[in-house]
Amino acid sequence: MVYSNFTKRSLLVSLAGLMAVTTAACGNSADNDANGGSSAGDKVTITMMHPWTTPNIDNDVYKARIEQFQKDHPDIVIKTDEVPSAQYKTKLRTLAAANNLADVNVVWPGADLAPLVDGELLQPINGLMDNWKDILPESALTPFNVDGQQYAIPTKQTFVDIVYYNKEMLASVGYEAFPATYADFIELVKKLKEAGLTPISLGNKEQWPLQSSILSIIGDRFTGSDFLQKVLNGEAKFTDPEFVSAIAVIDELSKLKAFNTDANNMDSVQSQDYLIQGKAAIHISSSTVDARVRINNEEGDKFGIALFPSVEGGKGDPAKSAGVVQYGIAINSKLDERKKAAAEEFMKYFVSEDLYKDLISNGVVVPAKVEVPEDASPYQKEMLELTGKGTAPVFDSIIPTQVVSVIQNGLQALTVGRGTPQEVAQDTQAAMDEYNKK
């Protein structure tokens, strides 16, 4: 399994640098206990840390459900710590290293989950699984299951690599559909530039979009879906020619000036606005963005969706979309019985059939088998069809965070003409080698 490659030492990685991140008001410390149930009469307070700070529709659904829980459970107070997504994983690692996690945490599978499990910081929830046996398939649960122990329940399934495009802009340069091959895609980029249009809107201020939404699927097209696991197993390297070719796509697009000039000063939401406002022809982002681009947009019909095209000689399946179950809800293993019971009650309420249906109604893809609500958008069926032909791995759901940071820096440097694909690959492999030594 992936998790066998990680040990408790992971919790100490870069601790000195990470401790600069605040750990206030989030852990299960003595102070926290003092402010919890014992000092508030019959009420018990549990803390929850989450990354739902941006105005994405699913974030609104999650926060509304927390509010509803508190209305329906006046004896339980949820004290939330809202951390922007770009800083969330760093803070989670910092709190984990200090053994100071919140009572309830949003976690990711793979490389992010492993050190939390190895450090025995999360409570196994096998005894609660009957709550989801009829709606969650094994494929949705497996990413959060380690050696037969279930540690979290996912709230959604995100496909990170959806290509949103302005049909009118593409038609203006001779394209009635999105290109099926990389060579034709590059020709499209050139024609859009010649027409005075910005080909691709990118908001890489947070650095993850190039890595997660774009490189994940480009890498899969070149290397195939088993490559990242092979890297973890020591059977492949980031310096292998196929992966260098994937990085070179970012370099080629940058040299063609395919991205907006302010890409590194713009966040992911602003880059969505670029597409919606007609300032760019293409935007590559998650399936969640469909709510803003098409479902809740009066001009939604002008936008189409596609997957990244095939590449010549590539080992990957061009029908696959890069996806991951995400936003797993997990419970701190260090809670006393009263707080543990409250956290479990919250988890059962929060991650439910009602939550999944609310998400579907708002255009969010979920991993659950629930009846599609009547008010669900017709765009939802199109998204499900597009993403239903196989799933490719997402880079930062597999590769350790420390290594992800290195490649993100390298990719961003390429967009401003610094470095080469080979150097980015070498630096990334060096970080992977250093990680494996610890």
Image (spheres, rainbow, N blue to C red):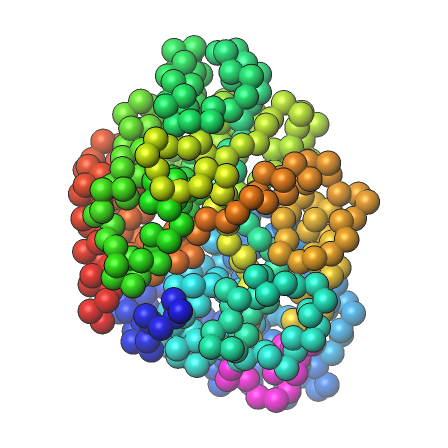
Residue 411 in sight: yes
Total marks shown come to 0
Q: Is residue 229 above or below residue 247?
A: below
Residue displayed at 50% across by 35% down = 307
Quadrant of the snapshot with the N terminus: bottom left
Q: Position of residue 337 (x, y in %)?
A: 61, 89
In terms of secondary structure, what is the magenta stretch mainly?
Answer: helix
Q: Is residue 248 left or right of residue 191?
A: left
Residue 169 in sight: no
Q: Is residue 324 left or right of residue 93?
A: right
The quadrant in which residue 88 appears is: bottom left
Pick whichever, 72 or 411, lies toward us: 411
Pick whichever, 197 or 422, lies toward us: 422
Quadrant of the snapshot with the C terminus: bottom left
Q: Is residue 433 above or below residue 259?
A: below
Is 392 in the magenta? no
The quadrant in which residue 56 appears is: top right
Residue displayed at 42% across by 73% down = 116
Residue displayed at 40% across by 50% down = 225
Residue displayed at 35% across by 73% down = 4
Q: Position of residue 153 (x, y in %)?
A: 59, 67
**Residue range (magenta):** 332-345
Q: Is residue 430 above or below residue 218?
A: below
Q: Is residue 330 left or right of residue 291?
A: left
List the single residue furthest toward the right: 374
Q: Position of residue 279 (x, y in %)?
A: 50, 22
Pick whichever, 305 or 169, lies toward us: 305
Pick whichever, 140 or 76, lies toward us: 140
Is 343 in the magenta? yes
Q: Is residue 136 left or right of residue 52?
A: right
Q: Position of residue 335 (x, y in %)?
A: 55, 84
